[in-house]
Image (cartoon, rainbow, N blue to C red):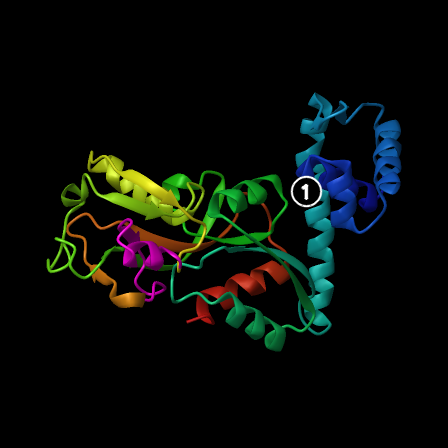
Amino acid sequence: MELRQLATFAAVAEEGSFTRAAGRLHVVQSAVSASVRALERELGVALFDRTTHRVELSAAGRAFLPEARRALDAAAAARDAVDVLNGGPRGTVRLGAMLAQPAPAVSVPRLLALLRDAHPGIDVELEVGTSAAHSEALRRGRLDLAFVALPRWAAPGLELTALGEIEMQLAVWPDHPLAARDAVSLADLEGERFVDGPAAWGSRITIDAAFAAADVAREIAYEIPDMAGLAEYVHYRLAVAIVTPGVFTPLHDVRLVPIRPDAPLCSTSLAAAAGRELSAAARAVVALARYGTR
């Protein structure tokens, strides 16, 4: 049994596809299939249930996967120990970045620049997506780390390193009836038409939960995957929005009004799969994210 076979098996399990696993490993699909078949012959079991449309772990595969990961983690830790003594950590970190980074304290480009200067042996494969998609990718092992904007209750199976928290505010046009208020409550917003991001965005999950906790109904009139673009919808009086003021630029004289006392709190964290040992390279990214991006 070779580490290469274990890595190939884990990649197929995590990607749910021989084709995607081949792309991730930068090899042809036939090599992935051959490696898995050889491993199955050695173990005497089928690790996957294969159909025309999908590939799923068999019962034996589900039992074997955590042990394969432990063996791969142990091999990576051994390499890390040598690398630390030989010029610092090296390797590739698969990092998820959000479509719209909601906390001003977090700058992914700055983090990557700091990482390049401090640890030139570390490469980063960047994947941009939603908090919900990144959470699933972390749990499946497709990502090592990911920035997410999720409260802890919405991140099962993940370990969160908190990076920042900010109160969200109401965005309205200048002569909206609520524009001159010092503050509004969520109850004051019942009956308003909202523009917001997709349901998989962390900020949307937080806002939806806040309205549910306040027992206030909310109408989403427009759903767009562009946080900066929310200002246009507010400017043209199509809808109001709840936004993070540190990222949202009040274009076209859009007004921001504090929400009291039940303002949704947008929390940004660097997430990893719970129970998975991070490589030295991934730990270096976490350290820089915690102390070097502010």
Residue 285 occupies quadrant = bottom right
Q: Residue at x 77, y 40 (%)?
A: 19
Judge whether 216 appears above or below 79 on screen: above
Task: Identify which residue, 102 or 77, lies in the foreground.
Answer: 102
Judge whether 10 appears above or below 280 on screen: above
Residue 250 seen in the current view = no
Q: Residue at x 58, y 43 (%)?
A: 137
Judge whether 92 appears above or below 200 on screen: below
Residue 248 occupies quadrant = bottom left
| Disc 1 residue type (three-letter) | Arg
Tell whether 77 sits left or right of 157.
right
Q: Residue 67: image x %, image y %? A: 69, 36
Q: Circle 1 sits in a helix, a strand or a loop, which is it?
A: helix
In the rendered image, residue 242 lying in the magenta stretch gets the answer yes
Which residues are drawn in magenta? 229-249
Tell whether 5 sits left or right of 58.
right
User: Label 1, on which residue?
Assistant: 70
